[in-house]
Image (tube, rainbow, N blue to C red):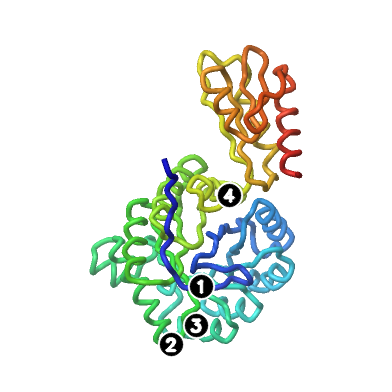
């Protein structure tokens, strides 16, 4: 059976720094720091961790003048492009644009009117950087809520179209759009409709998705459904945990859809009464020890003889467990038997050797 290939929707090309977005460019992974932006050292440390995990673009909150001043140093030392996240005060957007921001994220509905939105547009146009118009179900304009009764997908799309038309009428086309809700189905519906009527690059995500497990599930469904339909040019998985976990979850989604491969994919069983080794501990250790590997490798850590040998044989490197022992496979070939206590170290060493070669 032939594997299905996702056909991505055609969108305009923009750039964040030197990172291309849209028009067939690889899906860009974004995350956002959760350190106080005024703490330059902590924020830069987190951005470096994000970059090491594979994050392409980092976003930082700029809530006040202190953060705007700190942004200058953060932008200069960051290993990846940095976007300034602005709410309420349009002057902060202009300050960070003048400070060399690679992009700004604004919600035009909460920065005080069209004249202020126009001022941000002019500053971005002069600097040659992009704007993300972020429409959020939690902060829609009162007029739209009165018209539609609630933050419906239709209301979100209308908000986005109003603001994109405002930019287009001023000769500004260097923008991308997001239409986020914490409701997965509302998010998907809004992106589908907006994508139907616009060729703007889309930043896709489910906002306020929640803690690690719940948030990952909601994001995988929302982002995954849209990407499967070819909708989306850059993504962020929003989780109430470390932003590094957001990046890992994003790559898991992309890898599952075969849109972008980076790092180790671990195949492991949920275990049953047949399992003869401490599989949970082994999987946790393997995952952590291989977290810095960037090569797209498939690694199997299996607990018994039912599916274990088959999955291990199909992986680049794999172990199938038995009673207090296991067998090691490399590229489909049985290599050796292992004692339970050496499974993790031998498996990790083999993966590292394969990645380095």
* Percent position of residue 69, x then y: 68, 73
Q: Earlier in the sequence, mark 2 or mark 1?
A: 1
Q: CA distance from mark 3 to mark 4?
A: 35 Å
Q: CA distance from mark 2 to mark 1?
A: 19 Å
Residues packed near mark 4 inside 10 Å, few (<14), some (14 to 19) or many (20 plus): some
User: Farthest top residue?
Assistant: 323
Q: Earlier in the sequence, mark 3 or mark 1?
A: 1
Q: What count of labels does the image hold? A: 4
Q: CA distance from mark 4 to mark 2?
A: 39 Å
Question: Which residue is the site of mark 3?
Answer: 121
User: Farthest front residue?
Assistant: 1
Q: CA distance from mark 1 to mark 4?
A: 22 Å
Please identify, in this view, whether the residue under mark 2 or under mark 1 is nearer the observer. Answer: 1
Mark 1 falls on what kind of element? Answer: loop
Q: Are marks 3 and 2 in contact (CB under 8 Å)?
A: yes
Mark 2 falls on what kind of element? Answer: loop
Q: Are marks 4 and 2 in contact (CB under 8 Å)?
A: no
Q: Earlier in the sequence, mark 1 or mark 4?
A: 1
Image disc number at residue 13: 1
Measured along the vertical axis of the image, is residue 300 above or below residue 102?
above
Mark 3 falls on what kind of element? Answer: helix
* Percent position of residue 220, x then y: 45, 47
Q: Are marks 3 and 1 in contact (CB under 8 Å)?
A: no
Q: Between residues 296 and 79, which one lies in front from this camera angle?
A: 296
Measured along the vertical axis of the image, is residue 252 above or below residue 21?
above
Question: Which residue is the site of mark 4?
Answer: 261
Q: Residue at point 62% right, 60% down?
A: 56
Question: Which residue is the site of mark 2?
Answer: 170
């Amino acid at each position: 059976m032939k594997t299905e290939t996702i056909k991505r929707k055609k969108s305009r090309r923009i750039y964040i720094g030197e990172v291309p977005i849209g028009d067939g460019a690889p899906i860009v992974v974004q995350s956002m720091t959760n350190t106080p932006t005024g703490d330059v050292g902590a924020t830069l440390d987190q951005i470096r961790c994000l970059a090491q995990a594979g994050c392409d673009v980092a976003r930082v909150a700029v809530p006040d003048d202190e953060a705007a001043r700190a942004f200058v140093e953060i932008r200069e030392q960051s290993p990846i492009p940095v976007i300034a996240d602005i709410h309420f005060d349009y002057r902060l957007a202009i300050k960070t644009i003048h400070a060399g921001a690679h992009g700004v994220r604004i919600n035009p509905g909460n920065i005080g009117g069209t004249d202020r939105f126009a001022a941000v547009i002019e500053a971005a146009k002069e600097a040659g950087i992009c704007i993300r118009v972020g429409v959020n179900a939690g902060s829609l304009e009162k007029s739209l809520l009165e018209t539609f009764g609630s933050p419906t997908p239709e209301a979100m799309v209308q908000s986005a179209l109003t603001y994109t038309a405002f930019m287009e009428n001023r000769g500004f086309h260097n923008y991308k759009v997001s239409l986020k809700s914490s409701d997965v189905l509302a998010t998907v519906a809004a992106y589908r409709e907006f994508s139907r009527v616009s060729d703007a690059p889309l930043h896709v995500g489910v906002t306020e998705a929640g803690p690690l497990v719940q948030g990952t599930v909601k994001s995988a469904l929302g982002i995954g459904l849209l990407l499967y339909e070819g909708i989306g040019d850059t993504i962020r998985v929003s989780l109430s945990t470390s932003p590094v976990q957001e990046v890992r979850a994003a790559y898991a989604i992309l890898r599952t859809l075969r849109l972008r491969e980076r790092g180790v994919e671990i195949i492991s069983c949920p275990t049953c009464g047949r399992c003869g080794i401490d599989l949970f501990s082994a999987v946790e250790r393997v995952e952590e020890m291989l977290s810095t590997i960037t090569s797209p490798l498939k690694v199997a850590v299996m607990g018994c003889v039912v599916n274990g040998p088959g999955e291990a044989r199909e992986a680049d490197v794999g172990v199938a467990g038995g009673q207090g022992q296991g067998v090691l496979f490399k590229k489909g070939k049985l290599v050796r038997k292992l004692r339970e206590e050496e499974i993790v170290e031998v498996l990790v060493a083999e993966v590292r050797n394969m990645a380095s070669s």
